[in-house]
Image (tube, rainbow, N blue to C red):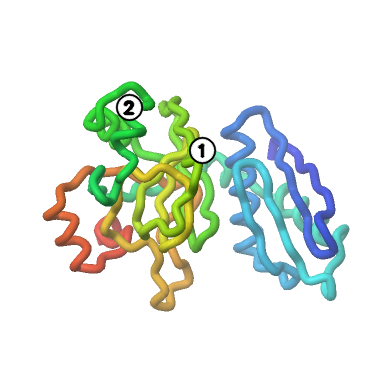
Amino acid sequence: MTGRLEVRPYGDAGLLVGVLGDDYETRWSMTQALAAAVREARPPWLVDLVATYDHLFVTFDPGSRDHHGVETSLRELDDALGEEAAALEAGGRTFTVPVLFGGEGGPDLDDVAGELGVSADSLVERLSAEPWRVRFVASPVGTPFTDRPDWEASVPRMKAPRVAVPPGSIALSGSQSIIYPVKSPGGWRLVGRTPLRLVDASGSDDLVAYRAGDLLEYQPIDADRFAELAEQGAHLGDEDEA
């Protein structure tokens, strides 16, 4: 790979790996490609890993490997990576996300539109004009953190976070967008809600269908369509994979 790793111990059984590269896209794609390589290799020392924009946090079993040994393994995996990072930058699968914007599901839509100096309808058009790239998947339970190159607006978080955000809520903060997979506290601004379930706990290897590099395309729907899809209990990706 063209970048290099900056590795340092993080506690008794952890490593924080910084990926250094020429630009944002390079650092992100290299980080995610390395994370995918570690998961695929399934080394016996691995306990868990979390990959973000340009850092990878790895926890390991100190009974089977020490910091130096894990670092050596990570560098070997990094050196073996070929086209994986380039494939991430080129883009993955596209998932259509039906969204009912505004109302009870998107109580912050009007306020956010006002802060950005546009109408609520114009904001919906902008949100759904281009797909959002999943940069990484994090807590709670498979939250997709997304952004897109043409989105330059910065949306401030709430001063007082909500105690409980409904699952499926589409939210904005800074230049990012997420979907809340489960009911949880949160301070992101809610602009809409999808009736689709994100988490599949039926026994599949993957709790969520999407991964880093995939694209989420917000598609406005009305209340009747929302109710119809909610009654079906469909998961995100069901239609796309059919």
**Residue 164 visible in the snapshot:** yes
Inspect the image, locate mark 2, and give the three-letter code of the amino acid beneath it: Gly
Q: In which quarter of the image is residue 53?
A: top right
Position of residue 182 measured from the top left corner of the image (x, y, whole percent): 42, 63
Identify the residue position indicated by label 1 in the image.
Answer: 89
Residue 86 image-quadrant placement: top right
Q: Say if mark 1 contacts mark 2, CB within 8 Å.
A: no
| Residue at 76% over, 43% down | 5
Give 6 or 114, whichever is nearer the viewer.
114
Q: Which residue lies furthest to the left in this view?
A: 224
Q: Residue 114 carries which label?
A: 2
* Pair 1/2: label in front: 2
Is disc 1 surrounded by few (<14), some (14 to 19) or many (20+) residues within 10 Å? Answer: some
Q: How far apart are marks 1 and 2 (CA)?
A: 34 Å
In this view of the protein, can residue 91 be seen by the observer? no
Q: Which residue is drawn at 46% across and 60% down?
A: 184
